[in-house]
Amino acid sequence: MSEFNLIDEKWIPVLYHDGRLDRVGIQTAFTKAGNIRQIAASNPMDRVAVLRFLLAVLYWCLGNPREGQDGYDTEVVCHKLEENRGCFNLLGKGKRFYQVRFESRVSPVASAKLFHELPAGDTVVHFRHLENGREGFCPSCVRSPSFDGQL
């Protein structure tokens, strides 16, 4: 399995001030931030998500900004990223950035909860109820574009 590390891999679409489009990794996004005009994802929600992710990384590296602080120390950010390089591997095993292991002690959730238009057994204002622990959906029904919620 090849390594895909978010620090170096070119995965963030950016638009530079000179009109050039490119993809950059996390480290380049921080070191070249003054040259980058905007995150150039086509979907506005993707732009917000990448910006929030980069802010989370920046706060993780430096802590909360102080009152009146203008800019950040790129060397400190790069050093913290390099110290924790393994946290940003997308593939493989090991510790991950702001992720926790799934605990098997969590009780399973019924598939009926995935369909917001179907009233569940705990919704009293609907006339037709499903029993959350008993009702289920086969994989072909869930993937079917014509599934209208009727059992």
Image (spheres, helix red, strand yellow):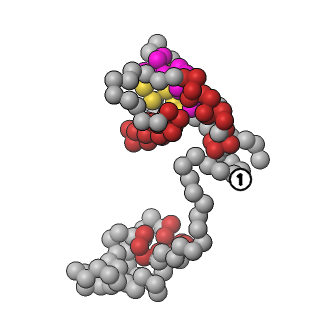
Left or right for 11, reference 129 = right
Find the residue positioned furthest to the top.
Answer: 18
Is residue 102 visible to us here?
yes
Give residue 65's quadrant in the image: top left
Which residues, given as a range, are shown in magenta?
A: 23-37
In the image, residue 61 lies at what x, y percent? Answer: 53, 35
On whether residue 34 falls in the magenta region, the answer is yes
Residue drawn at x 42%, y 82% is 132
Most distant residue in the front direction: 66
Q: Residue at x 63, y 42 (%)?
A: 88
Q: Position of residue 118 (x, y in %)?
A: 34, 75
What secondary structure do most residues of the magenta stretch adopt? Answer: helix
Q: Quadrant of residue 49?
A: top left
Dot 1: what SS?
loop
Residue 99: horizontal and vertical position, in percent? Answer: 56, 53
Residue 83 belongs to the span the image colors magenta = no
Taking depth in this image into account, of 147 and 38 the one nearest to the observer is 38
x%, y% of residue 93?
A: 71, 53
Q: Residues within 10 Å of mark 1 (few under 14, many from 20)?
A: few
Quadrant in which the C terminus appears: bottom left
Q: Is residue 105 left or right of residue 65?
A: right
Above-or-below relation of 108 to 12:
below
